[in-house]
Image (cartoon, helix red, strand yellow):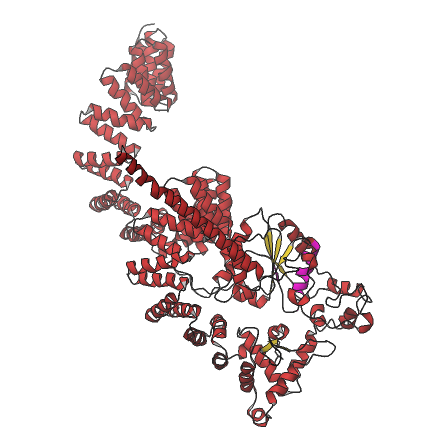
Amino acid sequence: MVAAGGVLVAVWTPLVKARTDALVARTTRSAERDAKAEDALGRLPTRKGKIPLVKDVTNRALLGIHEAIPLPTASVGDDRLSTDFPTYVPRDIDADLRTALEARSHTGGFVLLVGPAAAGKTRCAYEAVQAVLPRWRLVMPGDSVTLTELVNSGADLKQSVLWLDEIQDFLTGPDRLKGSTVRRLLADTACPVIIMGTIWPSVYDQLRTQTANTDSAGGEDEDLNQDAREVLELARRFSLGIWSDQEWRRVEELNGIDPRIDQVAHLREQAGLPQMLSAAPELIHRWEQAGDPFGQAVITAAVVARRCNHPALIPAAVIEGLAQELLTGTQRATAGEGWLAEALSWACRPVHHSAGIAPLLPVAEAIGRVDGYLVSDILVAYEAPSAPVSGQRITSHVWDLLTELATPQACLPIGFAAYLTGFKANAQSAWERAAGAGNSEAMFRLGNLFREQGDLEACRTWFTQAADAGHAGAMSNLGVVLKEQGDTEGARTWYTRAAENGNAGGMFNLANLLYDQGDSQGARTWWELAAEANLLSAMVNLGTLLRDTGDIEGARIWWRRAAESGDARAMNNLGTLLLEQEDFEGARSWYTRAAENGYVDAMFDLGVLLYEEEDFEGARTWYTRAADSGEVDAMVNLGNLMREQGDLEGARTWWQCAADTGDADAMNNLGKLLNEEGDLEGARAWWQCAADNGDAAAMASLGNLLHEQGDFEGANTRWQRAAEAGHTNAMFNLGTLLYKQGDFEGARTWYTRAAENGDTDAMFNLGSLLLKQEDFEGARTWSQRAADNGHIDAMFNLGLLSYKQGDFEGASTWYTRAAENGYTIAMINLGDLLREQEDIEGARTWWQRAAFEGNAIAMFNLGNLLREQGDFEGARTWYARAADNGDADALAALDGLTRAPE
């Protein structure tokens, strides 16, 4: 008993420890999350230690609203007017914008205002949330890291407006905001959050442009804009552009209320109201018409630096270096010793009537020194031909110079901008400088750049350096490179390190590798972790694995999550799942969503579904879209549909397109079309092409053609190949040919194979052959199968066989089934059987039916029956009809009846 007790303790101790460890681990993780949430919340702007409500935030600079021209002294103290905010002029989009906010206030949502610099985006957004959500909290994260930590730590953001003014600052750089983070934020509809963002149109378009092909091996995408594009596509977008006549009429109605508006309203031809209130015309005039060439040069240098994605704070040394490049030789020669200080002082001087609005703004953390300068984003965005610099004039030399002047940390974003604008050699230089200072993101980007260029050795080197520096994305991509080079174990090692460092791409790649190696459970574990990290591809793969293992509900859940986050593959998979469950409406809905998202497989699948529902126009529309996108099966189906609709030329065109890609079905169809048109050589040529591509149907068709042309040996060869490839009709034809040639065993073999494949004619012929060979059981079996499939001749043969075997009941049954299907000989035999059984009325009925079908034997039999019954007139009538139909016995009987005594 003591020994048993000892064993019992030994079993339970580690179990209790495991539970305790798990509890400790969960408590530790919870504490870590709470600490991260508290740290992230502590970096937010607060009011009396708390996140402020929307209605309480009135700090123009904090919100990101441009400084306006000053309120005249005489109006200061007017309670109706704010010194920071000119009176708001309602915009045309206000009603729709506020309706969108109201609708999303119940579930959460993402609203994005797109417009040029100083178009009034931020003010419009501010007024909208003030009007609709005044008692919500206004969360203003300073960067994407803070925002991501808020979301990942589970901080309470219920009924918060996330203020992402100049959202591009959150979408670029090494710690850029991920689409998965935004989806996670918006997924919890019970805790609604409104994301409010603003962005310039040029930057919006740039960030939505794909910069490289998607990594087919499943590595982290080399597309620098993937994350930005995913985020931006989640937003409900509103555009603010040129001020409309309606908006200007509202300005006129406010005349006399706000003197700042009165001051600029008459200048409507120059710019929009927000630009004029923020002194945009004066700023542009100062820059374009500068009386000081050195002052103009430093402004231009700052604009160039920002357009090249230098961080907002530009050191004087960078401005000086770029400005010298922009000056002429004469200007450089005549510059005084203090030229830079004087130029910067001039550029920082406020423009006319604007109080503190200037082209450049000096910034310092401590008194007595200037850390750098901010340049007006109005000037950065200004691209008129008259501007001192345009985007096209930023040369490779300027990029290189900026890289030399900037700090290594600044070279990372400069490299991004160079890459996106096509200056990839300059991007390489900038990233190499940043990487030289230990920046792992720059190393990672260099790896992607060299991979894109096909230099796998350099790519591997940089990925390795970044991975060794702890960059999880580089670990994952290094795994991809190693896998491509055949080093599966090395790939697995780096995927595992990436996954263990929380990289969703690494988890996904590791899962894929484990699945390929047969470890489905390991794959499931990592796909689940990647899916929980909101990686859509992982959700799709996990759903597929669950479906394959019979967990249909689990598959539905993950595919729906991915689909509702915009993954077209998941939408298509849901459509297929619902179709299998005969939920045609649901299938059509998901196929349509996937197709409208550009997923070609869904276009094809939707076309198939609509065709089956006899919506031929809808099917044609989607087949056409899929075919235009290069889907070969859609080309074939579209050709088939056009042929059914009588559009033979359209059918020919699409089949030709598909055939040109090597599609054997299309070649076979072209052969059929040409054969129908009498172009036998053309048909033979296409069928031969299809047959050479392994198409069994084409081999069979080619065999048919050769048989019709009397080339039995050629037909035999083609049918043999098609039959061996599994073509049922070819098996039947081969059996028939062999039968005619007297090879009954060969015929029996191929009839059997065709019959086992469900060919009813083969079942019948096999039954007939076996009957001839006196294999009555085999004959009955196959005749029965053919009859059960509706083959009338087989029903008749079963009647004959049953009769010969003395099974008159069976004979009656099968003769009746054949007769009821219009088989006249069966009607005659059934009548004969019924007469033998003395069912005279039954016999008369079936003979009459056969006679009405024009059968002379039935007419003769009716004549005999009536004669036996003494109805000579009736007998004469039927004998005459039988004789008229060529029955010699009826003619003799009629003659005998005529000469017989009354």
Q: For the magenta stretch, what is the residue range?
A: 111-131
User: Residue 760 at x, y = what percent?
Assistant: 30, 32
Work out whether residue 526 can be spotted: yes
The residue positioned 50% from the left and 71% from the top of the image is: 413
Work out whether residue 601 can be spotted: no
Return the residue found at the far top.
902
For the residue pair 265 and 572, the one nearer the viewer reads as 265
User: Residue 859 at x, y = what percent?
Assistant: 34, 18
The residue positioned 48% from the left and 73% from the top of the image is: 409
Q: Is residue 598 magenta?
A: no
For the residue pair 519 and 663, the one nearer the viewer reads as 519
For the residue pair 281 and 299, the one nearer the viewer reads as 299
For the residue pair 411 and 332, the one nearer the viewer reads as 411
The residue positioned 73% from the left and 66% from the top of the image is: 85
The quadrant of the picture occupied by the N terminus is: top left
The quadrant of the picture occupied by the C terminus is: top left
User: Residue 188 at x, y = what percent?
Assistant: 55, 48
Query: Is residue 297 toward the left or the right of residue 448 in the image?
Result: right
Residue 474, relative to residue 822: is it above or below? below
Res. 455 image quadrant: bottom left
Residue 485, relative to residue 823: is it above or below? below
Disc tally is 0
Query: Is residue 623 toward the left or the right of residue 8 in the image?
Result: right
User: Residue 436 at x, y = what percent?
Assistant: 41, 75
Return the residue found at the far front.
2
